[in-house]
Image (tube, grey):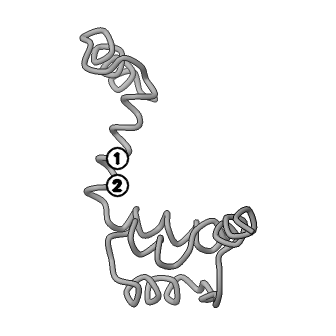
């Protein structure tokens, strides 16, 4: 982290705007993803690819339709899975 950024982070915490670095980082990343659709899409494509997210959740978090996320996944060379994601399968297994 550059000294300018580090000093800015420290100043925001000292001023009381943020109570911790983690709080500031959470807010910064939330803002980053809000304004960078390309980064939201890249993140959910990776999460879908590793089975950590369903296609509907990926579409929701990316802020696109299910059909659009399928297009992004296909362009990224990710195979569209049929059925439940690993996370959803684990969740369902706990219920039965």
| Residue furthest to the top | 14
Q: State the residue at coordinates (70%, 72%).
A: 89
Q: Which residue is the site of mark 1?
A: 30
Report if the CB atoms under discs 2 and 1 are less than 8 Å apart: yes
Q: Is residue 64 above or below residue 4?
A: below
Q: CA distance from mark 2 to mark 1?
A: 5 Å
* Mark 2 neighbour density, 10 Å: few (under 14) some (14–19) many (20 or more): some
Q: Which residue is label 2 attached to?
A: 33
| Identity of the residue drawn at 64% across and 70% down | 88
Q: Which mark is residue 19?
A: none
Residue 54 placed where, x, y %?
56, 74
Corner quadrant of residue 87: bottom right
Helix, strand or loop at disc 2? Answer: helix
Q: Does residue 41 lie above or below 11 as drawn?
A: below
In the image, 7 versus 63, the foreground residue is 63
- Give the x, y percent position of residue 53: 57, 68
Q: Residue at x 28, y 18 (%)?
A: 12
Q: Residues within 10 Å of mark 1 (few under 14, many from 20)?
A: few
Residue 82 locus on image (x, y percent): 64, 90
């Amino acid at each position: 982290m550059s000294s300018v950024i580090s000093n800015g982070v420290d100043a925001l915490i000292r001023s009381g705007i943020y109570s911790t670095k983690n709080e500031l980082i959470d807010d910064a990343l939330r803002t980053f993803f809000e304004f960078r659709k390309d980064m939201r899409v890249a993140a959910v494509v990776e999460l879908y690819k590793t089975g950590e997210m369903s296609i509907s959740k990926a579409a929701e978090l990316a802020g696109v339709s299910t059909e659009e996320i399928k297009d992004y996944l296909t362009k990224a060379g990710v195979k569209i899975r049929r059925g439940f994601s690993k996370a959803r399968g684990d969740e369902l297994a706990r219920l039965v």
